[in-house]
Image (cartoon, coloured by chain):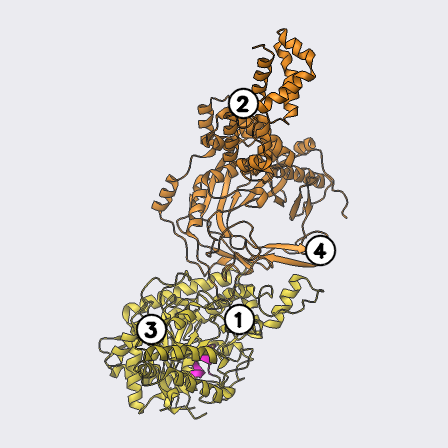
Amino acid sequence: MTTKTETMDYDEVLERFDPVLGLEVHVELSTRTKMFCGCPNAFGGEPNTHVCPTCLGLPGALPVVNGSAVESAIRIGLGLNCEIAGWCRFARKNYFYPDMPKNFQTSQYDEPIAFDGYLDVELGDGETVRVGIERAHMEEDTGKSLHVGGATGRIHGADYSLLDYNRAGVPLIEIVTKPITGAGRRAPEVARAYVSALRDLLRAMGVSDVRMDQGSLRCDANVSLSPKGDEVFGTRSETKNVNSLRSVERAVRYEMTRQASLLSRGAQVVQETRHFQEADGTTSAGRPKETSEDYRYFPEPDLVPIAPSSAWIEELRSTLPELPWERRRRIQQDWQLTDEELRDLVNTGAADVVAATVDAGAPVDDARSWWVQFLTEQANSRGVDLADLPVTPGQVARVIALIGEGTLTNKLGREVVLGVLAGEGDPDEVIASRGLEVVSDDSALTAAIDEALAAQPDVVEKIRGGKVQAAGAIVGAVMKATQGQADAKRVRELILQRCGAE
Amino acid sequence: MDPTTRTAAELAAGIHAGELSSVEVTRSHLERIAKVDSEINAFLHVDTEGALATAEKVDADIAAGRPPVSPLAGVPLGLKDVLTTKGIPTTCGSRTLEGWVPPYDATVTRKLREADVVVLGKTNMDEFAMGSSTENSAYGPTRNPWDTARVPGGSSGGSAAALAAFQAPVTVGTDTGGSVRQPGALTGTVGVKPTYGGVSRYGLVAFSSSLDQAGPCARTVLDAALLHEVIGGHDPMDSTSLNAPVPSVVEAARRGSSGDLSGVRVGVVTELGGEGYQPGVLRSFASAVDTLRELGAEVVEVSCPNFEYALSAYYLIAPSECSSNLARFDAMRYGLRVADDGTNGADDVMSLSREAGFGAEVKRRIIIGTYALSAGYYDAYYGSAQKVRSLVTRDFDAAYEQVDVLVSPTAPTTAFRVGERVDDPMSMYRGDLCTIPTNLAGTAAMSVPSGLSDEDGLPVGLQIMAPALADDRMYEVGAAYERARDAAAGGALVDRIPEL
C-alpha cells in the first residue's frame, strides 16, 4: 500500500497559492436513440441487448448522425451563451481500449458545435460568479467494463473483464470551462456551484436526466496551483470519478491541499489522471502515463459536416425554456420569499423540485417544508443530492394532497414517502401495501378511547374539572394503541366529548 | 451454347423469356468454378445452396408468369469478399477474419438479393483491399486467366479473374485507388468506379472511407451498366451516400452502342502517359484515341498539372484512414484471437492478435498511417495530402469545363508475373498512377479493354473518366468504343482468352 499522502492546511494553501480550475462535464443526452444508430438510448438493460452492427463497430457498419442529438447540442450551446458553429465536423479520437468498439471515439476536435460562452453561477451567499465556457462538443459514450478480480477494480491486475456495449454510442455533450481563476478560498465552492447550475440548466431544458449517481452527468476536475500573485499556471491534475456535487467540492479542496504540500516541499505536481475516493475524500494516482497520449485526431470521413442554418438556430433559441435563475427570480416574487428564504431553497438544491411539486398541485408552503426539511434530512443521511432522491415531485405532491384531505396524517405521510424511497412504488401503492390509511371510523376509535380513559381516571377528573390540556395524555395513549394511524385531532374531539368538556 | 460464355444481358433475356432456366445457368457456372478455380483461385467461398435457392425462385416466378423483379433476376454473380453477407463468411482476404460470419448484409448485398441476382460466392482480394495484384490475400494469390503465371491485378483480382475465367458473367468489386479498373485492364474486362457516394458503402469493410467505392465488373459495358443500376442509389444508412437518382447508365450504354460520338468532347490527360509506361500500352492507347476520333468525338489534350502529386497524397490519406479503420480488429468482439492463455493482459492480447492476423502490406500501411497522423507530423503529411486532394479536384473541375470525358491508359503496364513486385512496394504502388486521381476527386471512371499489347499479347485497358454524377457519359463513350474495337478486331477481346 502507498504511504499516506501529505496535505497542507487549507488556510496556509491560500496564503501561498492561487488555485486555477478547469471543469469538464460529460452529459448523456436523453434522446430516444443513440448518437449514430437506431438502438435505444436507455440506462441499464440486460448486457449487450441495446446493440447493433454500428454501435458494436462491426466491420463495414457506418454511423448516421442523430438529428435530435445535434438539436440538443445546439440548445445547450445557446443556454450557455455560446456561439454556434456555422459549419463543423466530427473527428476520430484514436486509442485502444476494449470497451470502445471501433478503437476510436467519434468526437469533435478543433471544430466544436458550440464555443465561447459563459454561465453565471450563484454562490451560497448570493454572490454571482461568471464561469467562461470554452466549448461544448458532441461525442459518443463508450461501453462499460467490469474488471473481475485484482485489487484495484481496474483492468490492470484483473483476472478477466466483462464488457457491456449497451452504453456504447450513447450521445454525450462534453462541456469544458475556460480556466477559472481568482476564486481563491471559494474555488471548491465555485466548482460545486458551477456543476449545480449546469445541472439545473440541463434539467430545465429537458435534454438529459443529469443523474450524477447513474453517470448521466460526470465531472472531471482539473486543478492546479500558481504561487500567489504569479500569472503562470502550475501543472494540473485531472480528477475523475467525481460523481456528486459534494464530491466535486471535496475533490477540488483535497487536490489544492495535496498539491500545495508537494510544491512547498520542492516536489513536482505530476500531470496525471487521479481517481476520487468517496470514502475518505482523497484522490489517488491513476496509472502514470509513460508518454503523453497522441490521439491522432482527424476529420471523420464516414460523416458529412454539420452546417446548422441560422434560421434553425434562431428557432431553437426560441424554444429555450425559462432558465433556472430566471425561474428563481419569478419564484421569489410569486411565493413572496425573502432573499434568505430563497437562498435556503437554492442552497439545499430544492428550488426546482419545490417548483415542480407546486406545479403538480401542492401548496407552496407544504412543498417547501417537505423538501427543505424531511427530504433534505433523507438526502443527507443517504449521502446523495436532493434531486437524486428516488422520489418525484409528483409523488410528494400526491402525499401532500392526501394529508390535506385527511387520508394521511403528517406522520403517516412521512412513512409513505419512506416507502416510496425504498422502492415500494407510488404513494397509493405504499399506502395499500403497508396499510397506512388514517383510522377515521369513530366506533373503532371510541373503544380505544374508553380503554385509555378507564386506565387513567385521574386525568379524566382533571379534564372534567376544566383542565382541557390534560387531554393530551389520553390522546398519546390512543395514538399508541392505534399505532399512530388515528387522526389526532379527531381523537382529541372525541375525548373531550366523552368527558363532557366541549 | 455454353451459358458461361454469354453476357449477363443475354442470360437475363433468355431466363426472363423462359428459354433458359436460372438453375441450369447457375449450375453451369458452379461447375465452371469447380473445374477451373483450383487453378485461378478467384473464389474464397462458394454458396452453392444459396445460389440455387435464388435461381429456383426466379425459375418459379417466370414459370408462374410473374415478371422478373429486376433486369438481372436469375443471373449469377460473384461478390468481392469485402462486402458483408449475412450468414455467409466474409474474410476481406485476411487471416484475422477467417471464419467470421456477419450478422448483417451490406446494402449492396441486400440490393442484389432483392433483385434476385444469384450470388455464387465471395471473390478473392488483396487483404482488406490493400494491393494491386491480389497476392496480398491470406488465402493465396488469384491467377490471371490470360496467363496463370501472372497476376490479375488487384485488389479486386478475384472479381476480375472470375469474369475472364467465365466463372461469372458479372461481379462486384471495390475501388479505393484503382482496385476495380486496374484488374479490369489486366484481365481484358470492364471495371467501373462509380461517382463516390453513388453506391452505398454500408457493409463495405472500410479500407479508406473517403476513397472506397463499390462498382460493377463485367465482360461488356452494357452488363456493367445493368449491374450498376441494381447496386446504385441513395442509402440512408451511409451518410456519404449521394441523395440523387442513379445516372441512366443502361440507357447511355445502349445509346453508345449506336457508335456515334459526334459532338462528344474527349480530353487526353497529358500527365498520364509518356515515361514509365510500357510502349505497347501507349500504342494501344493511341490507337484507342484514334478510334474515338473516328467515331466522331472531338479529341483535345488537357493538362492536369497536380496529378503528379496524386500518388503521394493517396499513399498518405489512404493509410491514415486505414490505420483508424482497422483499429477495430482487436480480437475483443470478433476475429482471430491469440495469446489469450491467462498470462497476457488485454493490451498484449490485442497486439499479439493483430500481429498474427494482419499481413505485411496491411501492417506497412497501418504504420505509415499512424505516423502520418501523429502529433507534429499531421500538418506535414495528412494536412498536405488533403491540400493536394483539393488541387487534384480543381484540375478535374477545370478539365471538365473543356471536355465531357477524360481518357488515359488504365495502368502503365500489362499484367506482371506473380512475385515480380511483392518485394518492391513502390513499383507496385506506381501501378495506380492513372487511377488514383479519380478516387481523390470522388468522380467517376471506368476501364474498357483496348486490345492486346503488341509486345506481350496481354490485355490493355482504356480509362474513361467523367465528372461526379455524370457516370452515364463514360458508359456512352465506353459502349461506343467497345463496339468499334470489337468490330475492327473481328470479335470481343474475351473470346481470345486461352482455354483453361
Classed neighbour count for the residue bearing mark 1: other residues with Cα under 10 Å, few (<14), some (14–19), many (≥20): some
The mark found on residue B69 in the picture is 3
The magenta stretch is: B152-162
Q: CA distance from mark 2 to mark 1?
A: 67 Å
- Judging by the rendered image, the residue that carries numbered circle 1 is B101
- Judging by the rendered image, the residue that carries numbered circle 4 is A149
Question: Residue A401 location, x and y as percent?
Answer: 50, 29
Chain shown in orange: A
Q: Is residue B160 magenta?
A: yes
Question: Residue B343 location, x and y as percent?
Answer: 72, 65
Chain shown in yellow: B
Q: Is residue B392 magenta?
A: no
Name the chain under label 3.
Answer: B
Q: Is residue A58 visible?
A: yes
Q: CA distance from mark 4 to mark 3?
A: 58 Å
Work out whether B355 lies above or below A482: below
